[in-house]
Amino acid sequence: MASDRTRRRSWTIAAAVTALLTVLYLSGGVVSGLRSAANLVVAPFSWTVNTVARPIGHMLAGAVNYSDVVAQNQRLRYQLGLAQLRANEGWALARELQQISSQLDVPFVANLHSVTAQVTALSPTNFAATVDISKGRDDGVLVGMPVVANGGLVGRVIATTPHGATVQLITDVNSSVGVTFGDARTSLVVTGRGVDNGLGATLVPISTAIKPGTILSTDGLSGGLYPPGLPVVSVANVSLTPGAATYDLTLTPLANLRAMTYLDVVLWEPST
């Protein structure tokens, strides 16, 4: 009897273990299946997220890199600008020195003191032709002083301030300059005809041996407005009106009055 009870207990335990193992086996399969099903459901979303997120990541990284490139370009442009500025400054200084040396190369005033001035304003019209310069009374510039530039006489000072002056050009209609040439036996008066009309001289005796290309310089007569020997104009044309006893001269200024940057004020007064 006892043995039968023991056998039944053993079979019961064996059956329970078998059932448990079966359940565990089936549970594993079910869980695995659920996992597979879950993967099938989730996988498309995961692919979509990865597909969308990856370009965004690249875009963000690109944006960061792009800002670095922009910053580098800005620094390069700044450095290039500085280099260009230095180059321009060097070029400007060289050009300024060249202008000064060429425009003030007036050997005929070597024995006279002068003051270098920069042109600050141009006021040429067909009647009045003047320029303003950067030196005035405080620099020794006085009314009546001659002004020269490259090539010859430019005009004379007609007004001053402590730190500036106004120069009447020889082309001004109110300008007149006593000149001579050759052996200085003949004196002529050169008058301005306006900026666009140049200069001229009239009533030149036909006995005067003058021809195109002749250089006319200030005569320096007593009481004149200019010291002697300042080159003024060259003769461009000699004309004779039929029946007249005098020449008319068309003259060209020796100084380039249209391209003046620096001028020399000759410290000479008519009374001296």
Image (spheres, helix red, strand yellow):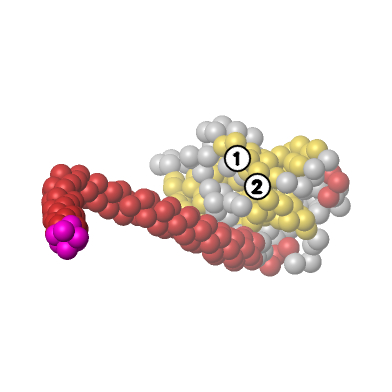
Q: What residue is at 76 percent from the left and 42 percent from the top? A: 164
Q: Residues within 10 Å of mark 2 (few under 14, many from 20)?
A: some
Quarter holding residue 32: bottom left
On the question of residue 151 being in view, the answer is no
- Disc 1, disc 2: CB below 8 Å? yes
Q: What residue is at 58 percent from the left and 63 percent from the top? A: 86
Residue reaching furthest front? 1
Give yes or no for residue 109 being in the magenta stretch.
Answer: no
* Residue 262, placed above or below residue 169: below
Front residue of this view, candidates 183 and 259: 259
Give yes or no for residue 6 being in the magenta stretch.
Answer: yes
Viewed as shown, does residue 156 lie left or right of 51?
A: right
Q: What residue is at 64 percent from the left and 50 percent from the top? A: 154
Question: Element at badge 1?
Answer: strand
* Residue 11, placed above or below residue 142: below
Front residue of this view, candidates 57 and 227: 57
Instruction: Tell me the residue that label 2 is attached to.
Output: 119
Q: How crowded is mark 1: few (under 14 residues within 10 Å), some or many (20 or more)?
A: some
Viewed as shown, does residue 238 lie left or right of 150?
A: left
Image disc number at residue 249? none
Three-letter code for the amino acid on which mark 1 is drawn: Leu
Question: Element at badge 2?
Answer: strand
On the question of residue 171 being in view, the answer is yes
Quarter holding residue 183: bottom right
Q: Where is residue 29 in the image (x, y as percent from the top left)?
A: 13, 55
Q: Give the range drawn in magenta.
A: 1-7
Q: Where is residue 40 in the image (x, y as percent from the top left)?
A: 13, 48
Front residue of this view, candidates 88 and 22: 22
Image disc number at residue 122? 1
Three-letter code for the amino acid on which mark 2 is drawn: Val
Q: What residue is at 44 percent from the left and 46 percent from the top? A: 240
